[in-house]
Image (cartoon, rainbow, N blue to C red):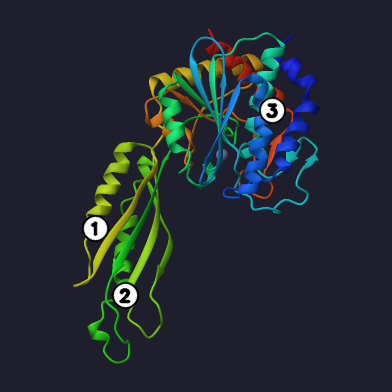
Amino acid sequence: MRPLDYLQSRLSAILADLEAIVVRESPSHHQAGLEEVAHWIDQQFRPFGAVTQTQTPNGPLLRVEVAGRGKRVLVLCHYDTVHPIGSFQPLWRVEGERAYGPGVYDMKGGIVQLLWALRASRELGLGWPQLELLFTPDEEVGSHASRAAIEEAALRSDAVLVLEPPTGNGDLKVARKGVGQYRLTAQGKAAHQGVEPEKGINAIVELAHQIPRVVALEDPERGTTLGPNVVRGGTASNVVAAEAWVEVDLRVWTRAEAERVEAALRALRPALPGASLRLEGGLNRPPMEPTEASMSLFEMARRIGEALGLHLGPGRVGGGSDGNFTAALGIPTLDGLGLFGEAAHQPTENVHIPQIPLRTALLCGVLEEMAR
Ligand SMILES: [Zn+2]
């Protein structure tokens, strides 16, 4: 039996698992919810290998070692979602060809898909490589507590597969922009606005000079963007503002661009006499830049997809994932292997049910190929 036929015949059981993980709500930082999902994952994956749970400040991190042959492959999944408790009413809903729920697409669907790829492969006697599965609790909030574990695991692996959703048109992801988060603070001097305003130095005015300089560092041709998206300053309308800051989101396709922008941000000088500037932050996720090795990984998946009737292109997206970390270490990384759907991070987030067996069969094929 082909994996696709097996998976098609098990679709209602797959949907039941998807419902089970989705109704256990697990927004980032919600300790009780995260623990409940971690427990569920632990139970499901236990038949495939030893599960270890490590407590991090952001929730449990699960690691499963699955014995196999051939290459050593790291599979990355996160089980936190962006959806606060109660954002979906009802929590789980199937309507037509779509299943709706918090995190169903980003990326609890990928976790269930991985589970069923292993079940199908075992049932049908297909091979898989030596696998290390990581389930992390904080991808949606920057992976600060998981990053070190992800990087350590990547360094002992030959390749990394990421079960984040594919692009909007179903392509896999071979490139992701790097993400930088900066805070530029202008320091001035407080004074009474009515009595002696000339003794003050207005930090908001200083910042107003700087923001256009920040935005001028964008390079549309190279895809480099800078978003000054949060700004705060001052204390009261009758006090000259002593301090103001802006938070800037940076997106870049290449490390070279990140370095250019960061150097320019550091080189900003105050416009007002007596004012000073301070820059904090840095590149949170380095760019995932395609390499020859990651493109041959993509090519392999594309061929397997083609045989299933899936036409997969090499997608490039602006959003980051944990694949950014592993790609930046030079480990061939293929992202976007998760379920097809739409509306990630939105209250209408959903997966396309007819593609669940197809995308899962694709994963079976990729795993089998990597066991050679
Ligand atoms: Zn995600």
**Residue at 63% from the left image edge and 17% from the top image edge:** 364
The N terminus: image quadrant: top right
Q: Give the distance between the C-alpha atoms of the residues marked 3 and 2, in whole angstroms.
A: 56 Å
Q: Is mark 1 within 8 Å of ligand 1?
A: no
Q: Give the distance between the C-alpha atoms of the residues marked 3 and 1, in whole angstroms.
A: 53 Å
Tag 1: residue type?
Answer: Leu
Q: Can you tell which mark lies on residue 242? A: 2
Q: Is residue 127 above or below residue 99?
A: above
Foreground residue among 361 and 310: 361
Q: Is residue 94 left or right of residue 117?
A: right
Q: What element carries label 1?
A: loop
Tag 2: residue type?
Answer: Ala
Q: In this view, does 13 lie to the left or right of 215?
A: right
Q: Is residue 196 above or below residue 212?
A: below
Mark earlier in primary sequence (1, 2): 2
> Which corner quadrant of the image does residue 188 belong to?
bottom left
